[in-house]
Image: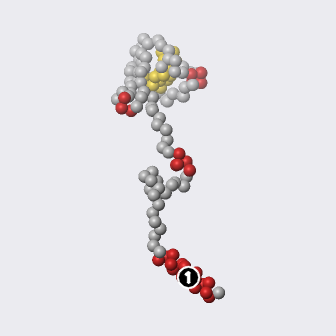
Amino acid sequence: MTRRLTLAAIGLLGACWAGPAAPQAFGPRWPWGPPADPRERMGPPPVVVPPGGPVGERRRYYRPTYGKWWPGQVLPPDAPTVLITDYGRYHLRLPPRGYAWLLCDGDLILAAIGSREIFEVIPYGSY
């Protein structure tokens, strides 16, 4: 029994004094070993090109195109507008206090009631 314990102790001490294990070459992708998660072994995700082409080829500034009306413009008093009260028909949210949804030339317009300044425009065909 003592002989077994002596051999086990010698083996344990020998393993400690043997030094560090030889480094394994895993390559440049995984210098510290392969990842534990197998999904990381699939490689990089696919390249997705945004609409309009790569970033360098797109126009520098995006400006949405509106028809006749755009935010910040003031509706003239003679503009042919219809007050919208059935918001669900056009899938609209309730207007904030002091604003109203108007239908003008086919566009849905959220405008201030007092100053008639346009806050939001939904172009014709988008609703």
Task: Name the residue at the left extreme.
Answer: 60
Is the residue 82 above or below the residue 60 in the image?
Answer: above
What residue is at 46 percent from the left and 70 percent from the top?
Answer: 20
Residue 26, position as x, y percentages in the image: 47, 56
Residue furthest bottom in the image: 2
Q: As displayed, is residue 59 above or below residue 22?
A: above
Q: Nearer the viewer, residue 65 or 34?
A: 34
Is residue 81 at all visible to an observer of this figure?
A: no
Q: Which residue is mark 1?
A: 9
Q: Position of residue 93 (x, y in %)?
A: 54, 28
Q: Residue 12 occupies which quadrant of the picture?
A: bottom right
Give the residue at x 49% y 57%: 33
- The residue type indicated by label 1 comes to Ala
Who is closer to the viewer here, 36 or 70? 36
Viewer-side residue, 105 vs 53: 53
Q: Based on the displayed image, in which of its 4 quarters is residue 72 positioned? A: top left
- At label 1, counting other C-alpha atoms closer than 10 Å, the crowd grade (few under 14, some 14-19, many 20 or more) is few
Residue shown at the point (41%, 21%) measured from the top left: 65
Residue sitting at 43 percent across and 17 percent down?
Answer: 67
Residue 31 in sight in this render = yes
Secondary structure beneath dot 1 equals helix
State the quadrant of the N terminus: bottom right
Q: Quadrant of the C terminus?
A: top right
